[in-house]
Structure formats: structure tokens, C-alpha cells
Image (spheres, rainbow, N blue to C red):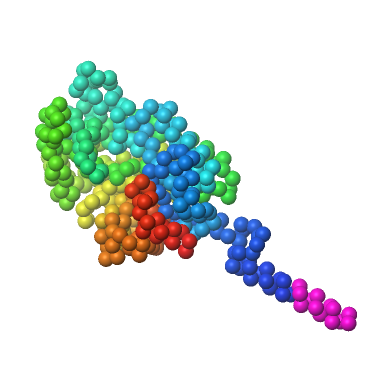
Amino acid sequence: MRIKSLYSIFKFIACSCFLISFQVYNGNAKGLSSDAKIKNPSQYIILNGVAATPEAFQEVVSVFGDSRHRKTMIGVGFIISYLGSPPDEAAGKLQKYLSLSEQFDVPIVVQLDGEQWWQNRPDLWNWWDKSKSGYNPENTKNVEWTDWSPDSAVKIGWRNWGRQVRVLPMPNLMSPDYRQACHVEMKKLVPIVMNWWHSLPEEKKYLLVGVKIGWESAIGVNNWYYPNGNNLLHHPVENDPLYGLKVDSLPGRGVTTIGYAAVSTLGLATSGKLTEEQLTEVVRLHLKDLCKVCADIGVPRDRLFTHCGGWSHGETLYSAAVNQYSCPGLSFYTYAFDPKKDVTAMKAVESGDAPYWGAVEWLYDGKAKEGNTKKGWISALKKTLSIKNVRYLCIYNWGGIKNNKAAIEAIDTIIRL
């Protein structure tokens, strides 16, 4: 009887050990530590445009559930236009997002923009209106020109993000005063991000996906200039031309070519024909300089991304996304269904030695053969996330897809793989 009892005990212990080992192997043993799970995601699907409120973050969590300890995690992207609002407002907005990220365990991408919106700095751009704040004729050096003389400085620009709108003049990306303004504001904001990140416990470091610099950085695309545009400034918007850009017509893209101010300030040329390569060099140095500011503050390369434009097959602008301080980031709309089809973008991504890259502005348009279906969205998401070293894709925007059942179900499927 004693021998039989010892045998039974031994058998019970052996079976129990096997069962526990099997459960640990599958990562589902009840009561086990999170070591059996994925500690940090390897990729992210970021939703841009989620408001800085508890309700908005809770909405994302409610839709997709808890995506922690998954290979692909849901996160939120937001934009701080540091020349578009007073510094205290920009810092306050940033701190709200950081707090919400930690509160809801939702990773974030912090986009810092000094290009697209700079309405809070008329002291940089107002060179023509004596009745408005910031007026200084010398500000012609801070905006773009339509030829090699500051006498051709622009007063207005146009943008089309779904519809055409008037915007302030395109900044001269190489203007010392403009660059200094960007540095000053970034040196206020980036330390806030890094201090927050360093204060996080090690198991929550994944909450910072990255700091993103640029916003489809380019000259004459998201801020272009129509012929004789200054004459339209005081006329009704209804009189504005509507033909927009011809993105393949370089360097002017079918409207009036700008970029002379930056190219001449940089010393690349002061006369002759403005070239695509010169404009690319301006954008490259612009992004490199701002990335160096971040790197000097302590942002590691694997958490620093650029966002460069690129619209025409073979154009050199894509290469401006690459520098030694950051990971390259590009937009994908036409090729969101399969970014590998954008050969020029992939060539740029592969040209550097960065640990990652990002599809930092992405939206599947439903024009692939599967259409705007769950299957189509799953295919597009999978093809993007399967490309070597892609760290994240950022869907523009949450407001445009949150009621799209096919998109939501596809994203949910991907994060549960």
C-alpha cells in the first residue's frame, strides 16, 4: 500500500509539472505573471485625431478593448503646432495627452509641427500689413519668394486637405529667425515628453511610440502659391482659382514655383533655374536640423520619426525623410493597400540604417480589388505591417473611420492575431 501511495504521489507531481509547463508555454496559465505574455508590442496601429479628453480615450479603449501584451497595439496620435498657439497652450495640450496615455494605457505618437500652422507668430510672417500685429518689412526674409528677390515675397498660400483653403504664406524653411523660433519652442516641449517617458516604470516605456518631426514636409505642396496670388488676398475666396496642383510637374507642380527664399538663404543658388534637387536639400536639412534638436535633448533614434512628403514617382523629395538622428516616415494613401508598390518610398526607407521606419500618415481608400470591405482593410493593414522594420502605421483620421464597420473590424482582427 505504501509503494502504491508513493507511486500515486509521484504521478500526481509529474502530471502537475507537465500541465504547468504546458500552460506557461502557451502563455495562458491562470495566475501566472505577465512574463508569460508579450511585454512590449513590436508594432502599433495609431489613430490620429483623438481628442485630449478622458471620454475620447475611453471611446478608443471601449472599441478595441485592452490591447496590452499584444504584438500589435492600438495607440493615439496627436499634433502640437507650436507656432500656431501660445506656448503655454501648446505645453498644456501636450501634458494632457501624456497624462491620458498613462491613465488609459494607450501608447502615443507626439507630432511637433512648425510648418503648416504658424498663425501665432505674425512677428515672423507679417511683412505687408501695418495695421496688424507683428508688422515688419524685414519679414520678407522669413517667407517664400516666387523668384530670387525678396520683392517677390508671398502674402498668401493655398492648401487642400479635402477642400481648398487659404493659409498664411509658406515659411522660408532656412530663415535663421524661423529656425530659431522652431528651436525655442521645441526645446520647451521635447523635455516635457522625455521627462514623462523617463518617469514611467520600465514596463510602461512602450507608451511612447515616438516623437514625429515634420508634416509631409515639402515646399509648395501643402502650402502652394497661385500665379499673382498676392492680388487675391483682399478679394473674396470665391474668386480664387481651384485647379490645384499637378504633383508630377516638378518643381512647381503646375502652380507658381516657390522655394527661392530657402534655396538662396542656404546658399545653394541665387540665380538661374530653381531645381527639384535644391528644394529636396532644403527639406532634408530642415528635418535633419530639427531631429538633431530632439536627439540632443535625449530622444533615442528608435523613438524619433520624420514625416516627409512625396507624391511623384521617382522624385527626390522622398529621400529627405532620411537622416542619422531618426527613423524615416512617409505618407501612404494611393499605395496604402500595399506600400511596397510605392517603389520610390521603399527605396528611401531602405537607403538608411535606421532601426525602424513608419507609415506615419496612412489611409486605405478602398480602391483595391477587395474594395472598402473588412477583407480589403485586413489585406491593406497586413501588407503594410509585414514590411521589414515598419514600427507603426498611423491612420488619418479617427473621426473618419470610427463609424466604418469594415475598418473597425479589420483593425480589431489585426491586433488579435
Residue under the point 16% across and 29% down: 233
Is 194 placed left or right of 405 in the picture? right
Which image quadrant: the N terminus?
bottom right
Is 206 placed left or right of 395 in the picture? right
**Quadrant of res 171:** top left
Residue 130 against residue 330 in the figure, above or below: above
Q: Residue furthest right?
A: 2
Residue under the point 17% across and 51% down: 248
**What number of labels is visible?**
0
Q: Can residue 253 be spotted in the picture?
A: no
* Residue 186 coordinates in the image, percent (x, y): 40, 34
Residue under the point 76% across and 74% down: 12
Q: Is residue 146 magenta?
A: no
Residue under the point 14% across and 34% down: 238
* Residue 234 coordinates in the image, percent (x, y): 15, 26
* Residue 333 coordinates in the image, percent (x, y): 28, 54
Q: Nearer the viewer, residue 187 or 208?
A: 208
* Residue 364 coordinates in the image, percent (x, y): 31, 56
Question: Which segment is the magenta one?
Answer: 1-13
Q: Nearer the viewer, residue 271 or 25?
A: 25
Q: Nearer the viewer, residue 146 or 24?
A: 24
Q: Can residue 156 be spotted in the picture?
A: yes
Q: Residue furthest top?
A: 131
Residue 276 against residue 34 in the figure, above or below: above
Residue 292 against residue 355 in the figure, above or below: above
Q: What is the chief secondary structure element of the magenta stretch?
A: helix
**Quadrant of res 211:** top left
